[in-house]
Amino acid sequence: MLKKITENATSLIVTVLGLIFLYIKFLLSENLLVPETDEVVSINIFTDYRTIFLRYIPNNHFFTSLLGMITNYIFGVNIVILRSLSFVFLLLSIIHIHKNLQNKNIIILILLAYSFDDLSMDYSFLFRGYFFSSFLLVIIFFNLMDLDREIKKIRIILILSSLLIFHSLSNIYIVLPIIFVIGFKLLKNNKL
């Protein structure tokens, strides 16, 4: 029992240190204060209460824009704080994965691979909704894994899938296979 607690504590410490390393790497980035084009559009157009529901281009990630609007009203427009919102959702995803996986070393491998991939690093710190979507997908994934044992998790999965589509319309391509899996599961259990 003590060995298991020690392994989990070690894994958690390495994971936290890895995340701190990633955040420091972000803060020391040469592009820290240079916003991308999508970020400029999101900050200028979609973080205003009058245009938050605007969907004329697929650029609006609703929940990220909502959090950005709240952040801008509290702190003013600060690109570092806005970009850190994405990192918070990356952090929440990793915490959720860590909580649900039996083999904690996989998290360390994921963080190690992630830290060497510049594209992933760049996208994890953009003021976009990608990591909010991935956080919801991590929750959906682990609920799908438990679907055989608890059929009641379908409600949670469908609510989170609805939030994904509401957040960004392009998430429908991810949600449709999930809905098909749930439909087949319900047919298999004669619940439909």
Image (tube, helix red, strand yellow):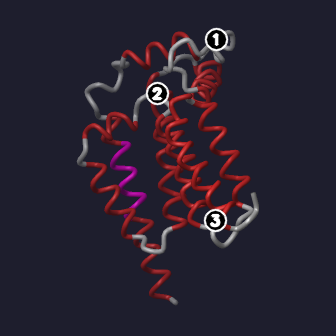
| Label disc, if present, on residue 179 of the rendered structure | none
To which residue does mark 1 refer? 51
Q: Please state the horizontal and vertical placement of residue 19, each as a whole percent of the image.
A: 39, 51
Q: Residue furthest bottom?
A: 1
Residue that numbered label 3 is attached to: 147
Residue in the image at 64% along x and 11% along y: 51
**Residue span colored magenta:** 14-23
Q: Pointer 2: what residue? A: 127
For the residue marked with disc 2, what is the amino acid?
A: Phe
Which residue lies at the image location 35% right of the left edge and 35% below the top edge?
Answer: 27
Q: Nearer the viewer, residue 87 or 65?
A: 65
Q: Which quadrant of the structure image shows residue 63? A: top right
Q: Does the magenta segment cover residue 112?
A: no
> What kind of element bears circle 2?
loop
Counting residues from the N terminus, which is met first, the one under dot 3 or under dot 2? 2
Disc 3/disc 2 C-alpha distance (Å): 33 Å
Disc 1 residue type (three-letter): Thr
Residue at 71 percent across and 65 percent down: it is 151
The location of residue 176, given as percent across then percent down, is: 56, 42
Return the disc, 3 or 1, that comes first in the chain's sequence. 1
Q: Residue 119 at what x, y percent from top left?
A: 28, 37
Image side of residue 56 versus residue 27, left or right: right
Instruction: Tell me the CA gap for discs 3 and 1.
Output: 38 Å
Which SS does the magenta portion mostly show?
Answer: helix
* Residue 18 on the magenta segment: yes
Of the two numbered discs 2 and 1 on the same chain, state the one appearing first in sequence. 1
